[in-house]
Amino acid sequence: MEKQLIPPVLIETPRLVLRHFYQGDAQGVFEFNQHPEMLKYIPGDPILSSVAEAAQIIENVWLNEYRQYGYARYAVILKGEINPIGFAGFKFEPEFGFPDLGYRIAPPFWGKGLISEAVDALLVYGKTTLELNKIVAIAAVDNAASNRILQKFNFKQTNTLVEHGMPHYFYEKLL
């Protein structure tokens, strides 16, 4: 079996590193996707049933998007650790014509400001490294924490839409 190298760090914050996912993250991706409460506002994303399913998402979604767009969701890892605790980053959404900012971390890490820390760094990275000029974000109306994060970083709510039967706010931000 070929040994895979851990991808280099793309973004570093005081407590986190963000980097591309790779197949060595399959166990960590499986683990952080085992929390039903994390998927409460994302009814289209089921709990993963196996590490092999996590490996398929890494290959068919994230690695494919890195190749196609040059960016995707990134692994969010606590400094000094190896396994991802979630993801944060951009996903090109053809129906909107702009990258969507998205994030998700396992519940044991909620309420610690980690996603705000990641978003702050991602906005700089998106503007300076990826040269993005506009991004969008979607948050379930009832997801107060996610909406607070987007409002904190001056995303402008421009619409309401329904995804998987659940109302969501649609946000836009110029970088």
Image: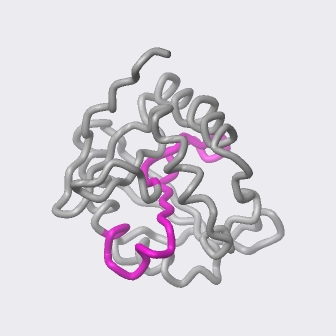
**What's the residue at 49%, 81% (across, down)?**
145
The one of 17 and 97 positioned closer to us in this rendering: 17
Q: Residue at x 56, y 36 (%)?
A: 58
Q: Give x and y (percent) for residue 3.
A: 40, 20
Q: Is residue 129 above or below residue 88?
A: above
User: Residue 120: which quarter of the image?
Assistant: bottom left
Task: Examine the rendered structure and indicate whether residue 7 appears above or below residue 95.
Answer: above
The answer to whether residue 101 is seen in the rendering is yes
Seen as rendered, the residue at the extreme front is 1
Numbered range of the magenta stretch: 87-116
Residue 175: in magenta span: no
Q: How is the image coloured?
A: one colour
Instruction: Locate residue 32 relative to residue 160 in the image: left or right.
Output: left
Q: Position of residue 131 (x, y in %)?
A: 30, 37
Visible residue check, residue 159: no
Q: Nearer the viewer, residue 13 or 24?
A: 24
- Which of the two residues, 155 or 114, is positioned nearer the viewer here? 114
In this rendering, would 37 be left or right of 157?
right
Up/down of 170 relative to 50, above or below = below
Q: Which residue is pictured at 59% across the width and 80% down the height?
A: 143
* Image spot of residue 116 (x, y percent): 33, 70
Residue positioned most to the left: 14
Q: Give the quadrant of residue 21.
A: top left
Question: Is 56 in front, or is 82?
Answer: 82
Residue 69 lies, in percent from the top left, at 48, 29
Which residue is pictured at 52% across the width and 44% down the height? 91
Residue that lies at the very extreme toward the top in this rendered image: 2
Number of numbered markers: 0
